[in-house]
Image (spheres, rainbow, N blue to C red):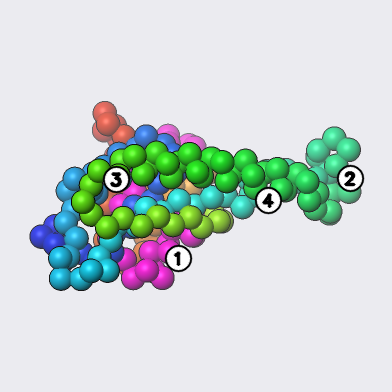
Amino acid sequence: MDTSGSLTCVVVAVDGSEVSMEALRWALDNLKLSSSSSESSFVVLHVQPSPSVAAGVSPGTIPFGGPSGLEVPAFTAAIEQHHKRITETIMDHARLIFADRSVNVKTQVVVGDPKYKICETVESLHADLLVIGSRAHGRIKRMFLGSVSNYCSNHVHCPVVIIKPKGDSSE
């Protein structure tokens, strides 16, 4: 991989896991942005789940939630607030990692399904590289949940670096 400074946009996806923060450290330690463009930057991206996805339940399954076809605004608002606090904590952790670096770092938060939103953001930013951590779910769990890093590596149109957890020798 060419790390000689020809990169103008590197997206690093973070989800709060230690391996995603390790991916951010790896990118900052090992990649050099182009010095010929003042717009060159690392983009720390977090995808916040949408309230309906995050809840994983319909209002009908919530005691006294009412008919299953209706939205429960207070419930949705509470989930949104909870996810905003989580997102703030994740981005604060990321800021601690890049705060003392002399590189241009931008942060971006989008809402939705991580595998789709990471790909959309990488494409819309015309990123040169995506750096993402792998949570190393077991084969059975990965079969049912899918792997965000695997999906992204097969759907973005730029190179992808996948950082595995320390000590993981699978695959």
Residue at image location 25% in from the left, 43% down from the top: 100
Give the quarter of the figure containing the N terminus: bottom left
Q: Secondary structure at mark 2?
A: loop
Q: How many marks?
A: 4
Task: Find disc 2 in the rendering and name its residue.
Answer: 66
Task: Find disc 3 in the rendering and name its residue.
Answer: 98
Q: Position of residue 169 (x, y in %)?
A: 26, 33
Q: Is residue 39 above or below residue 150?
A: below
Question: Residues in magenta?
Answer: 114-143
Task: Inspect the image, locate mark 4, and give the three-letter code of the amino acid beneath it.
Answer: Ser
Category of crowding for the residue at label 3, using alpha-carbon neighbours closer than 10 angstroms: few (below 14), some (14–19), many (at least 20): some
Q: CA distance from mark 3 to mark 2?
A: 46 Å
Q: CA distance from mark 1 to mark 3?
A: 24 Å
Residue, far top = 167
Q: Are marks 2 and 4 in contact (CB under 8 Å)?
A: no
Task: Inspect the image, locate mark 2, and give the three-letter code of the amino acid beneath it.
Answer: Gly
Q: Position of residue 137 (x, y in %)?
A: 42, 36
Q: Earlier in the sequence, mark 3 or mark 4?
A: 4
